[in-house]
Image: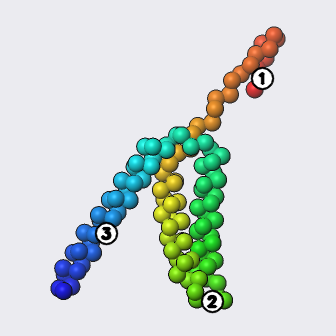
Amino acid sequence: MNPTLQFLIFIVSFFIILALFIRLIQIAEKRLGGKVPARRYGLIMGMIIAGMATGLVMMFQALTLSLLEPGFLLLVVSTLAFILWSHVLPAPPPTLQAQRDESGTVES
């Protein structure tokens, strides 16, 4: 196959995949934006970051080469999840309802 044609196929495929990922981010933000409780949001973000760290450790450990490929895949998936999840905003904290006692002071 002609190298120029291979290059064009690669570039077109790359931009199609990129556009699909951007659309996935838009859909996730539209459906989940402002609806995920802050505690759950932080827990999921922590799990994603732990996946990234685990992937790095699996890739750069010196004991066996068999962990290189799964470590790389875990790192890639965690990185893509981080990009997606960082575009989803957590739910705003509930507003503090100020209660007034008889003297007019505000308690929260």
Pointers 2 and 1 in contact (CB under 8 A)?
Answer: no
Instruction: State the SS at label 2.
Output: loop
Q: Report x, y in % for residue 45.
A: 60, 56
Marks 2 and 3, how far apart at CA: 32 Å
Kind of residue at disc 3: Phe
Marks 3 and 1, how far apart at CA: 57 Å
The image quarter containing residue 47 is bottom right
What residue did someone put label 1 on? Answer: 107
Look at the picture and state if 23 lies above or below 101.
below
Q: Report x, y in % for residue 59.
A: 58, 81
Kind of residue at disc 2: Thr
Pointers 2 and 3 in contact (CB under 8 A)?
Answer: no
- Looking at the rendered image, the quarter that the N terminus falls into is bottom left
104 on left or right of 27: right
The image quarter containing residue 92 is top right
The residue depicted at 45 percent of the width and 47 percent of the height is 29
- Looking at the rendered image, the quarter that the C terminus falls into is top right
Mark 2 / mark 3, whichever is N-terminal? 3
The image quarter containing residue 16 is bottom left
What residue did someone put label 2 on? Answer: 64
Q: Name the residue at the top extreme.
A: 102
Mark identifier at residue 99: none
Mark identifier at residue 14: 3
Instruction: State the SS at label 3.
Output: helix
Look at the picture and state if 10 lies above or below 104.
below
The residue depicted at 34 percent of the width and 59 percent of the height is 20
Mark 3 / mark 1, whichever is N-terminal? 3
Look at the picture and state if 6 lies above or below 82.
below
Pointers 3 and 1 in contact (CB under 8 A)?
Answer: no
Kind of residue at disc 1: Glu
Q: Report x, y in % for residue 64.
A: 63, 89
